[in-house]
């Protein structure tokens, strides 16, 4: 393909520019949030540890949801119906 055929058309280019600007704004907001946390006395190591623990929590939660889903299929019920049996809140 010619280099011209690989270039985005006007609408795609605008959409990409908009997405780039959104990502830059999110990056700036995250930098500001990090600066705020650092000014409150948190260390980068503590923040990285917290993020790591959140990732681990989410992985475990995803595995639990998958197991609940499989159990629900085996029992022929919805996952929601299993929550009370295991003392889970719908917001969990």
Image (cartoon, helix red, strand yellow):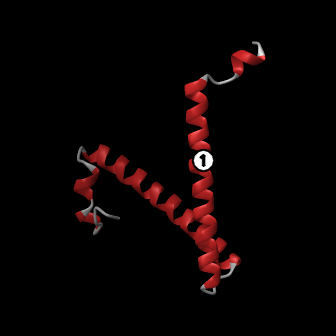
Task: Tell me which residue sits at (65%, 80%) in the image.
Answer: 38
Q: Position of residue 77 (x, y in %)?
A: 23, 47
Please name whichever residue, 89 or 22, is drawn nearer the observer in this view of the structure: 22
Q: Position of residue 32 (x, y in %)?
A: 61, 70
Q: Position of residue 79 (x, y in %)?
A: 29, 51
Q: Circle 1 — which element?
A: helix
Determine which quarter of the picture holds residue 34. Answer: bottom right
Q: Position of residue 72 (x, y in %)?
A: 30, 48
Above or below residue 42? Residue 80 is above
Please name whichever residue, 48 or 57, is drawn nearer the observer in this view of the structure: 48
Write down the residue under mark 1. Answer: 21
In this rendering, the count of numbered labels is 1
Q: Quadrant of the C terminus?
A: bottom left
Please name whichever residue, 6 or 59, is drawn nearer the observer in this view of the structure: 6
Task: Tell me which residue sits at (28%, 61%) in the image.
Answer: 90
Above or below residue 24? Residue 35 is below
């Amino acid at each position: 393909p010619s280099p011209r055929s690989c270039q985005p058309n006007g609408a795609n280019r605008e959409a990409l520019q908009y997405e780039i600007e959104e990502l830059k704004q999110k990056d700036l907001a995250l930098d500001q949030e990090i600066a705020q946390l650092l000014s409150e006395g948190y260390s980068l190591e503590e923040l990285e540890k917290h993020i790591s623990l959140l990732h681990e929590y989410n992985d475990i939660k995803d595995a639990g949801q998958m197991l609940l889903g499989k159990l629900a299929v085996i029992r022929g019920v919805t996952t929601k119906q299993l929550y009370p049996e295991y003392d889970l809140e719908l917001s969990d």
